Image (cartoon, helix red, strand yellow):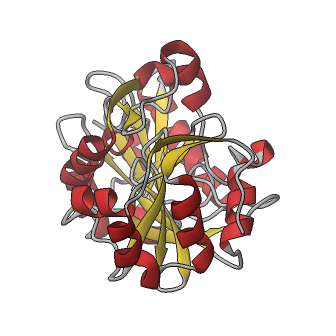
């Protein structure tokens, strides 16, 4: 029997809903629905949701696998989903989906409640600063980045705004596409995170790609404020100059690059990058030549 250390109930989950989804999830999940209903776990970052409500609001939005059941949402609009015997961590803000391997529901809840894993596994920064500023989001609210991270928005608390959870998820998908499979969540040391494992891979290889982007922007402008977006499908990273007229540098694992100006949106640049379009390195050695 799964027990939460602290739980603030919001609404019961109906017997009809439980009967509808019981065959898709472990018995411990069903027991939690019956005992707790929908509500806030602990400090409110994680919330146990009504699966019928989630299914209704996400119908045709995220493209989740057949048989998926949304279990939890977070204060940053991430979702924990059960699908065909696996737990999935969906992070629309980063455009990724990670698999949670080797844990049962009791262990999953223990990880949710472990404050030491809030960043390493769940990537909750910069949520705490936004929460301290505006309070814990309402049950069907979340903090969303404005502009979206996928569109070059900075990963900082001053760019987080409160809004409706389901509406924000639909907006992300409409503007940035559905999340793509990235990797596996590893709890504790070596956990998957968006700053080190999406697309380009973790550790020094990813750091090197970011370094390349920073070095090239240093040739184009001084004191640039740069943001990094990890690209899907192992394509590398995109280093974004967060300023009017700043532009983007896409960096591949082989360190070849593509510079696009700010007038070119992220998806258009990514499409060209996928197609093999590249900017010769010598262009960056000219005064403004990369532009």
User: What residue is rendered at 41% in x and 23% in y?
Assistant: 159
Q: Is residue 57 above or below residue 18?
A: above
The image quarter in which residue 140 lies? top left
Which quadrant: the N terminus? bottom right
Q: Residue furthest top?
A: 133
Q: Is residue 208 above or below residue 116?
A: below
The front one of 195 and 108 is: 108
Q: Position of residue 175 (x, y in %)?
A: 21, 48
Q: Position of residue 60 (x, y in %)?
A: 18, 66
| Residue 276 in view | no
Compared across the picture, whether 204 is left or right of 149 comes to right
User: What residue is rendered at 32% in x and 58% in y?
Assistant: 54
Q: Position of residue 286 (x, y in %)?
A: 37, 34
The front one of 96 and 274 is: 96
Q: Is residue 69 above or below residue 46?
A: below
Which quadrant: the C terminus? top left
The image quarter in which residue 62 lies? bottom left
The front one of 52 and 225 is: 52
The front one of 90 and 230 is: 90
Compared across the picture, whether 209 is left or right of 241 comes to right
| Residue 202 in view | yes
């Amino acid at each position: 029997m799964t027990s939460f250390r602290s739980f603030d109930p919001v609404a019961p989950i109906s017997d009809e809903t439980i009967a509808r989804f019981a065959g898709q999830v472990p018995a411990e999940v069903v027991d939690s629905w019956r005992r707790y209903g929908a509500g806030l776990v602990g400090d409110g970052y994680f919330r146990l949701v009504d699966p019928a409500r989630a299914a209704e609001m996400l119908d045709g939005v995220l493209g989740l696998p057949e048989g998926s059941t949304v279990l939890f949402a977070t204060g940053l609009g991430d979702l924990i989903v059960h699908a065909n015997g696996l737990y999935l961590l969906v992070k629309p803000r980063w455009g990724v989906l990670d698999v949670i391997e080797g844990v049962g529901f009791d262990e999953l809840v223990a990880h949710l409640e472990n404050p030491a894993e809030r960043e390493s596994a769940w990537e909750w920064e910069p949520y705490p600063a936004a929460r301290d500023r505006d309070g814990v989001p309402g049950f069907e609210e979340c903090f969303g980045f404005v502009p979206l991270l996928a569109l070059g928005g900075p990963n900082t608390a001053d760019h987080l705004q409160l809004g409706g959870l389901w509406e924000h998820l639909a907006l992300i998908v409409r503007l940035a596409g559905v999340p793509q499979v990235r990797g596996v969540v590893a709890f504790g040391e070596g956990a998957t995170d968006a700053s080190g494992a999406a697309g380009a891979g973790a550790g020094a290889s990813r750091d090197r790609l970011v370094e390349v982007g920073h070095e090239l922007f240093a040739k184009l402008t001084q004191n640039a404020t740069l943001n990094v977006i990890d690209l899907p499908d192992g394509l590398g990273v995109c280093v974004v100059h967060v300023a009017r007229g700043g532009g983007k540098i896409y960096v591949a694992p082989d360190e070849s690059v593509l510079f696009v100006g700010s007038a070119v949106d992220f998806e258009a640049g990514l499409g060209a990058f996928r197609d093999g379009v590249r900017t010769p390195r010598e262009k960056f050695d000219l005064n403004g030549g990369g532009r």
